[in-house]
Image (cartoon, helix red, strand yellow):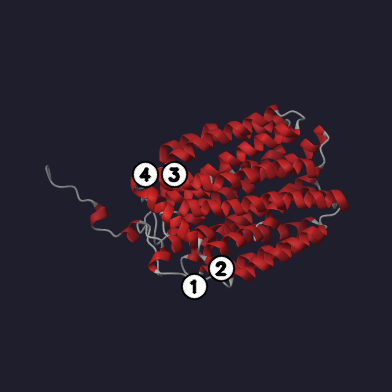
Amino acid sequence: MPGAAVSDPSTHVSASELERHLSYEGWRVVAACGLGAFVATIPLSTFGIFLPALASEFGWSRGEASTAYGALTIGAAVWAPIWGSVLDRAGARPVVLACLALSGLAVVSLSALTSSLFQFRAVFAVIGLAMMGASPIAYSRAIFGWFDERRGRALGMMLTGAAFSGIVLPPVAQSLIRAFNWRIAFLALGSTTLLVALPIAIAFIRDRHPVDVDRTKEASASSARQALRSRALWTLLVVAFAGSVATNGAIVHMAALLGDRGVPATQAALSLSAMGAASVVGRLLTGWLLDRFAAIRVSFLLLTIAAVGAFVLAAAHSIGAGLVAAVCLGFGSGGETDVIPFLLSRYFGMRVLSTLYGLHWTAWGIAGAAGPILLGRAFDATGSYGTALAGMGVITLAAAALMLTFPLAPHRVGSDDIRPAIESRG
């Protein structure tokens, strides 16, 4: 009827009911964030594919070339808490858009790479800076504002974007290098970020609630200080490092390791795709598990599976063993990527989520530098990756055991409850 009031479904349907419907705007935010995560991880997913071609053309050793990956992860480690603080105060949208643009331009610039190792490292350091502003730190900030009851599933679906990058991009990069050359491959991959992902992010990624900088600045600083005094946070930081050092090393060196042991290059590239596929399954399944079971037990299982992958890869001499190792590493590390932001949001609320998640990425960045460089140095010194990988498997098992000591979860913290859970526990 003309003049009749239009019913606002949000006044009659609870937030948990809205989250169940695909028409809910939050799911469009999840999809756009997933695409952003896909392209933001291009340098990570394809570094191992470019490594042999670049080392061969410029005469670099694998240890020398791996330092660029280390520059990326160290840059990420330095910038992660900085971006986290900015995200907590300014929201996700402006940070994501700026960093997607910078990341795409940096990857495109690699098509003009020279034999200067300094240039190679510098570009990847810039990529590390940009990647953190267009990483799950930012996307989780946007998504958690839209979800509470289905937070685990929304997070898992967003993180599958990064995992799909690991499935799709290694063979794509290998094909581009084989059909054209590595310069064209970098140009094509960087252009995908600028011409596809960035426009979609502009159209769909936004924060549910505007950020009141004046209101949150002082409170955020206080909450962050409290969190830094808690054993729960430091346990997660140690686990983030110890649980990812083997996976980061494998991402860079798996294709080269299998190639050295007689596996054809195309099959070796498939192992990285298998790791990415397993990561997708791990992230989706973990998101579902986190909404139903204790996150501590889920984390223990995932880290144990990742450790098995490291041990198998240490002894792998066939594509079959390589695929088993890749699946274990991908499933375990992919699922663990869900666990930490989930626990952070439940323990400390939304007020300082991005700052604390940024600290997690600092730990990951240090592991990301250590894993590939240690494996590269081990190979340069001994001609083998086996012993170093087995040692990293032991470290991953230790991280799994450490999670069993994690404090019991506090009361449920909703997406709109910005009081840190540690305050409610006295």
Above or below for 292 versus 199: below
Helix, strand or loop under label 2: helix
**Residue appearing at x 41%, y 37% in the figure:** 203
Q: CA distance from mark 1 to mark 4?
A: 32 Å
Residue placed at 55% from the left, 47% from the top? 80
**Viewer-nearest of labels 4 and 2?**
4
* Residue 402, image quadrant: bottom right
CA gap between label 4 and label 2 equals 36 Å
Q: Which residue is mark 2?
A: 298
Q: Are marks 2 and 1 in contact (CB under 8 Å)?
A: no
User: Relative to 426, is 158 on the left or the right?
Assistant: right
Q: Please tell me which of labels 4 and 2 falls first in the chain.
A: 4
Measure how far apart labels 1 and 3 are at the Cα level.
Answer: 30 Å
Q: Label 3: which residue?
A: 92
Q: Secondary structure at mark 4?
A: helix
Q: Few, some or many C-alpha atoms within 10 Å of disc 3 (few <14, some 14-19, many ≥20)?
A: many
Q: Is residue 288 visible?
A: yes
Q: Amino acid at mark 3?
A: Ala
Q: Position of residue 75 (x, y in %)?
A: 62, 43
Q: Quadrant of residue 68?
A: top right
Q: Three-letter amino acid code at disc 1?
A: Leu
| Image quadrant occupied by the C terminus | bottom left
Q: Does residue 176 appear left or right of residue 286 in this picture?
A: right
Which circle marks residue 250 in the picture? Answer: none
- Which label is found at residue 213? 4
How far separated are the C-alphas under marks 2 and 3?
28 Å
Q: Is residue 2 left or right of residue 186?
A: left
Q: Nearer the viewer, residue 249 or 163?
A: 249
Reading the chain from its start, which is encountered first: label 2 or label 3? 3
Three-letter residue code for mark 2: Val
